[in-house]
Amino acid sequence: QSVLTQPPSVSAAPGQKVTISCSGSSSNLGNNYVSWYQQLPGTAPKLLIYDNNKRPSGIPDRFSGSKSGTSATLGITGLQTGDEADYYCGTWDNSLSAYVFGTGTKVTVL
Amino acid sequence: QVQLQESGPGLVKPSETLSLTCTVSGGSISSYYWSWIRQPPGKGLEWIGYIYYSGSTSYNPSLKSRVTISVDTSKNQFSLKLRSVTAADTAVFYCARDRRVVGGGYYFDYWGQGALVTVSS
């Protein structure tokens, strides 16, 4: 049972924007940076966002991240069919002494 | 470009030990942390544990009693052993480079393609 809660699914038409929330607590998001991962069907997860809002080289600026208190948000603008994937947030949990992932959100492009 | 590749048996019998190795290429295993992460079919991601190139480790408390992660810097490899497996341990196992930056966050910037391990008699 994950300590980071995400909506099971979000959807929007091509070209539109979606946001994915990640809710935690003071022992994880409240005191640590968040990262986000994209998992395309049948593939390994890929780092999208680290340190709350930084993008690795090669990740388009259509992807953005933010964090406030014990919650974080991933935004995807200009939605494309290639963005259909599962998205996970993650951070360190100081109480569990473990890295924890969110429950995962499936993005569907209508 | 750093690449990681998992290897090991795809089928393990209940109560036995699951063993996987991750080979790192395109870069040195030194000076970094390395993690194992698993994903049961159709479910989410679970961090198993990490090892620093020097050999220090940290494990997920939920698995700590059954897990050992080791490193072989001469071969640029690190390995996972999970003891006393049951069907609930069936999963895709990923190895990943674990970035732990002083004053920054923890994240996984390079991942292997994953290895499916099925626990069944």
Image: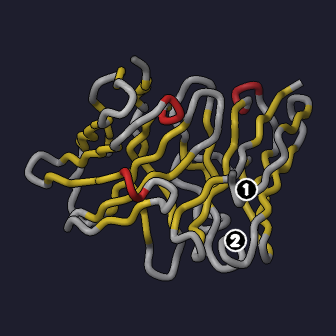
Label 2 sits on residue: A29
Residue ID at (78%, 73%): A70
> Is residue A18 at least partly visible in the picture?
yes
Q: Give the structural element (helix, strand or loop) at label 1.
A: strand
> What percent of the width, then of the height, locates residue A29?
69, 71
In this rendering, position of residue A46 left or right of residue B119:
right
Q: Label 1: chain? A: A
Looking at the rendered structure, the kind of residue marked 1 is Ser
In this rendering, the answer to whether A25 lies above or below A89 is below
Label 1 sits on residue: A64
Answer with the quarter of the image where residue A49 lies. Answer: bottom right
In this rendering, position of residue A110 left or right of residue B97:
right
Looking at the rendered structure, the kind of residue marked 2 is Leu
Give residue B95's mark: none
**Camera-side residue: A9 or B63?**
B63
**Camera-side residue: B64 or A28?**
B64
Q: Give the structural element (helix, strand or loop) at label 2.
A: loop
Quadrant, the N terminus of chain B: top left
Seen as rendered, the residue at the extreme top is B121
Residue ID at (72%, 47%): A103
Residue ID at (50%, 52%): B47
> Is residue B92 at least partly visible in the picture?
no
Q: Label 2: chain? A: A
**Camera-side residue: A53 or A23?**
A23
Seen as rendered, the residue at the extreme front is B15
In this rendering, position of residue A110 left or right of residue A46:
right
